Image (cartoon, rainbow, N blue to C red):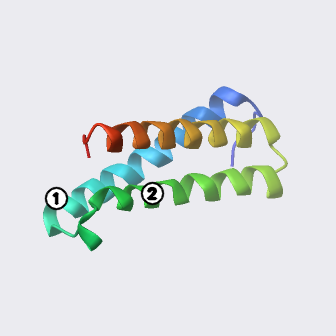
């Protein structure tokens, strides 16, 4: 997987996985027009699943606590940005 156990690497990995998942979901919503229950913003929570899986793998299987904490921090930051975007109707 990766050799170093550090918080910045975890943040970077978390943001990469979350950004890639968000972009994929954004493209699916834009192309297909898929909006269940008239709230397409809820689909962006699916973008957190790969990051949470990476966090669990880093912490449990590889014993990289600092890296897993960095991924967790990126997930929390993404969720905060998500709720701010929902509040101001950016999504």
- Most foreground residue, 63 or 52: 52
Query: Can you tell which quarter of the image residue 54 is in?
Result: bottom right
The span from disc 2 to disc 1 (Cα, nearest Å) is 16 Å
Q: Position of residue 34 (x, y in %)?
A: 21, 70
Q: Position of residue 68 (x, y in %)?
A: 72, 43
Give the number of callouts. Answer: 2
Q: Position of residue 90 (x, y in %)?
A: 25, 40
Query: Can you tell which quarter of the image residue 12 is in?
Result: top right
Is disc 2 surrounded by few (<14), some (14 to 19) or many (20+) residues within 10 Å? some
- Say what secondary structure mark 1 lies in: helix
- Say what secondary structure mark 2 lies in: helix
| Residue of label 2 | 45
Q: Is residue 45 above or below residue 19?
A: below
Query: Can you tell which quarter of the image residue 24 is in?
Result: bottom left
- Most foreground residue, 56 or 43: 43
| Residue of label 1 | 30
Residue in the picture at 57% in, 52% down: 51
């Amino acid at each position: 997987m990766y050799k170093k156990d550090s918080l910045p690497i975890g943040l970077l990995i978390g943001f990469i996985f979350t950004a890639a998942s968000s972009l994929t979901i954004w493209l699916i919503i834009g192309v297909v027009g898929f909006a269940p229950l008239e709230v397409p913003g809820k689909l962006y929570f699916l973008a957190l699943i790969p990051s949470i899986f990476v966090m669990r793998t880093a912490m449990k299987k590889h014993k990289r606590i600092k890296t897993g904490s960095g991924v967790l921090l990126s997930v929390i930051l993404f969720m905060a940005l998500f709720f701010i975007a929902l509040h101001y109707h950016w999504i």
